[in-house]
Image (spheres, rainbow, N blue to C red):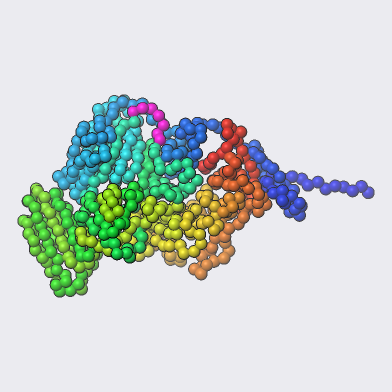
Amino acid sequence: MPIKKARKLILAFNRGVVSALGLARIDLNRMGMSAETQTNWMPRVLGSMMLRPGLQFLERLNDDAGAAGRLLPFTFGVDDQALLELSPNIMAIRDPATGLLLTRAAVSGQLLNTGFGSDIANWTDDSDAGGTVAWQTGGYAALKGSGTDFGKLNQTVTLADSGVERWLLVRVTDGPVRFKIGSSAGDDDYFAETRLDRGEHHLSFTPTANWTVEFANEREFNARVTQCTVQTSAGDITIATPWTPTDMPKLRWDQSADVIYVACDGVRTQKIERRGNGNSWSVVDYLPENGPFRVINVSGISLTPSALNGDITLTASDPLFKSTHADNRSIWRIASEGQKVTEAITAQNTFSSSVRVTGVLEGRVFSIVIAGSFTATVTVQYSVGVEGSWVDLATTYAAAVSTSYDDGQDNQIIYYRIGVKTGDFSSGTVNVSLNFAGGSIQGIARVYEYTSATSVKAHVLKDFGATDASRDWWEGEFSDRREWPTATSLHEGRNWWLGRDKVHGSVSDQYEDFDDNVIGDAGPISRSIGFGPIAVIHWALSLGRLLMGTAQNSANIAAAKIDGNTVIGARSSSFGEPLSPSNFNLKNEVGRAVFVDRTKQRLYELAPGTSEDTGGVSGYESADLSVFAPDFNEVGITQIAVQMKPDIRIHCVRSDGTVGVLVFDRLENVICWVTVDSDGATGVVEDIAV
């Protein structure tokens, strides 16, 4: 009887490439449907296969064929997306739906004295009584307020090209500064009032009549603007960035609404901001004003502020400062011995900061000083226990005086402030102060100019409590001097920055607030990582918990979430508790992610495991997705991106310019590697954005 040969039918094409090292494994069912090479054929999870979609040439990145680049996807809504194209020190904006760059048309009508080269001529000083505007050496328009009154600067332009969109280029050296555009001074009907931080801004508006640009600042230090000009020539909207070609692979980012927070090893933290109608973009420094700080000083060096507020000089008793402290605007916090608050009042409803009075008997006495030429009624107010519930003291003052006050409230914590209530001010300037010998005030200043190793100039962000030397001071955690975070992630309502063996999480729901005086679960989190190779945190991911990759387990390549079908969940901040106003927390219910191991050859899946920690929470386990093709990416992976439709496809850009694509479905046990390459001019794929 003849012997019949059984033929293995190829029932599906979704097993992909298998390593030549495993071709002899005929005991594995998948081997009969696997390939040794599979290039530009894209399988589906269901088993069919087709040629990969075609590629289209759009244009050269920033008109430079040799520029290294990076693509950042920006998503605010399903129909509200942008593709941010980063090339060396430049960002452009592309519409992914049309493939077109954001461009501007040629327009007429220009501001005068746009660079403030030698003065602020052609600009109008429209400051309130307590505000000032001045020109500063270096080409700055400097605006300063009084806390309530504004320093204001504006200029009106006669309309040309009615109804045509145009862009203003604004460069801010020291902010924030308020900005708006209106059909008349004080209005913002063309561009809604906003705050501009230190950096470069391209702001779009469409006037139909004469228009007025206005800058304003109410704070007691000088906000400085170095340029404001209409971009009259046609061209692409391109924005200056600090990232060089070597920085591109090291970029890590996360998005919240219209802001992308960006970390990069060796580069100051940044924000990419979108405003208005979606055509206004900015790249600015990320500069939180109240932390995070390093540990308190333990050396013998003391710091002395020259004034309680405004623009001051910080003097160190021994060499301490570096020029890089000024270059990146580092912050310093100094605790005073005793408490002094002052205010120069030029308007109604203006009060000083508060002093915190504690102790017994004569130890509670504080001084009240009122000076100046004015017509007003000065009131001292108190609030018991916490600030906010202010009550007037019986005695008021209508003339200059120097006196003291003893409340007799032994062992009570009471806050006091001094100022002028609504309706009690007529004219002049009222200089008021409270001085209490006990307690301490922690003031904060940001350095903006380096003078010497013992002296720098700074803006006061939070008033100091004294002008005496103090050894109780803290240096800001982020600076060129102390280096920058290498990864960032938004996780459970906090903005996390990681790197240099540190983890910093912002105050809950306040992504630029690191005030360590906030009490309770909402307070910021700053911790050191005490184990493993931790000099660089390669990536951070918000999954069921905050996960991070180090040199011990991963390559210096951004990990990626598998999150296309996830939802936002509400849960309590403590497991097992019902939702309440105090513990409500929103999180993205992302369960899985992928990362590249430190060999840069293997891709791993991160997913909840079966084991639980001591708190009953499932841990995360990694699974090798390259087990059937361990040498498939042996040339090295440089970037990864995850596509969710029509199937999960994980694109791995490789160092030779090809792409290894993993078609993946855990339910169907599809782990299918194929190669995609390009026959373009260079045949090299640099980056992929989904």
Residue at the (59%, 47%) spot, across then down: 636
User: Does the magenta portion include 95?
Assistant: no
**Residue 71 vertical placement versus 609 (above, below):** above
Query: 312 or 550, which lies in front?
Result: 312
Residue 589, position in %: x, y?
Answer: 49, 55
Image spot of residue 610 (x, y percent): 58, 63
Q: Nearer the viewer, residue 84 or 567?
A: 84
Up the image or down, 136 lies above or below 56; here it is below
- Furthest residue toward right: 1
Query: In the rendered image, is residue 553 in sight?
Result: yes
Q: Residue 212: where, in percent of width, then height?
A: 25, 34
Q: Quadrant of residue 320?
A: bottom left
For the point 42% across and 55% down, the residue is 496
Q: Quadrant of residue 228?
A: top left
Nearest the viewer among 83 and 558 is 558
Residue at x-position 64% and y-position 38%: 40
All told, the count of numbered labels is 0
Seen in the image, is 372 located left or right of residue 661? left
- Residue 174, percent from left and from top: 29, 45
**Is 96 placed left or right of 469 in the picture?**
right
Please give the name of the residue rendered at 69% of the width and 43% of the height, measured from the top-left corner. 37
Q: Which residues are magenta?
A: 232-238
- The reply, left or right, for residue 8 in relation to residue 626 is right
Based on the picture, tell me whether residue 237 belongs to the magenta stretch.
Answer: yes
Picture layout, residue 385 above or below residue 124? below
Q: Is residue 646 visible?
A: no
